[in-house]
Image (cartoon, helix red, strand yellow):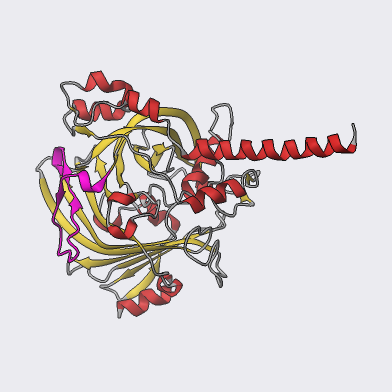
Amino acid sequence: MTLRALIFAFFCLLINSGVLAADIVERSFSIDREKMSSLNPAPGTVITKANVKAFSHILTPKFIDLISEEFLTIAVGEPLSFDPHPAYVEATERHLGKTRLGDKPGIILNYIAGRPFPREPQLDDPRAGDKLAWNFRYTYAYDGGEVASFYWQYKDIRKNKIERRLSFYASSLRFMHRHVQEPVPDLPGNPSQIFNALYLNVLSPPDLRGTQLLVQRLEDDTRQEQTWLYLATHRRVRRLASGQTTDAFLGSDIMIEDFLGYNGRIMDQKWTYKGEAWVLLPYFNHDQQQLEEAGHQQDGYKFVGFHGKGDCFPNVTWHVRKAYILEAEPYWKQHPLSKRRYYVDAQTMQPAYGHIFDRSGNLWKTGMGAYSHPDRHHPANHGSGAPVIDAASMIDIQAMHCTTLQFKATVSKKRLRETDFTVQALRAKGR
């Protein structure tokens, strides 16, 4: 082969590789509009006990049971695309093929930014579950966000009664693998190698006011996550042992490990990919929902409400989306769960809902997060490309109890201060 032919072949290889990479990334973030529309019932359809069998092909078995037992009805909305920020897509393409799994669980190598494993998961890949777990961990979210108004309600389903109301302030900050807000990709001066930090502060009721929680998710998954609780009644900071993150948080139906879908180490679970499904998920436009007042919102913002048995389910529209079924089984034998089964939205990698099974393998809880398109939400979120969690609930099927959450979540246009996510800040704010 001549030198000219070799050069031509080399450039063809580069071009073809670029096209292949772009195609992989495009498939990872796009939606099949034709299939979605063909499977989606007409917007305005309401799925009830009377007609649920006609829609069983786009519902999970557990949700068919819940609808059949009149726990909830589902109103169908129009199909939507939740395109991530172009910076996240570009980072995925730029770093395609560089990230790989280590030999042991919880080890990921060479990850910088974007979706770590954008190729479609395959059932014959024994580590497809681990790859999805990392995609879930590093899914696109804005680099800093606040929930200035955050309401929790504890509800007795049998009595249809609200037992307790809590309000919080919450914020989160990504220290590493940032995409939009400078500096990118990492904040400087991060000796502890924190990936992401989450902060909660109880504003009411009076007996809990001033209680704070700080979670520092470390980049090194083999290190134990760092979680601290400031108890206002004792006026001191207490570090939580790993086992305490599976306790009920402030008497709710939610564990600290349940935050953000899963707030634990990847290495602590056996992750198994169980295939894909086209199912109804709670994705919608906020401004098209039946909204309600909560608290005093000077900007006129209104919240998603709840309906169904005990008012435990977000009152939003759902539409058909592709989901990956991902199961997580804890290695710790004393864990209160036998497994979690997630339905992870394929486009956004958000855990739209999941089923939690007790140690005997029986359904214990169902949890879900309802996501609004950012461009149809609070003006601060327009253009962010980040799905906005509007409401969430954890329903204890066995105890007939639930905890519901309402959010006024906004991306932070100003960079949040790293010092606000430290133990010293907990003590200073608690004085």
Residue 358 % position (x, y): 35, 38
| Residue 211 is inside the magenta segment | no
Q: Residue furthest top?
A: 54
Q: Residue at x 19, y 44 (%)?
A: 289
Question: Residue 28 or 429: which is nearer the viewer?
Answer: 28
Quadrant containing the C terminus is bottom left
Q: Residue at x 40, y 32 (%)?
A: 322
Q: Residue at x 26, y 71 (%)?
A: 210
Relative to 377, is 311 above or below? above
Relative to 236, is 62 above or below? above
Name which quarter of the figure residue 349 lies in. Answer: top left
Question: Residue 83 or 48: which is nearer the viewer?
Answer: 83
Q: Residue at x 41, y 38 (%)?
A: 344
Residue 288 % position (x, y): 21, 44
Quadrant containing the N terminus is top right
Q: Is residue 157 visible?
A: no
Left or right: 323 as drawn, with respect to 122? left
Chain part drawn in magenta: 285-311
Residue 405 % position (x, y): 24, 52
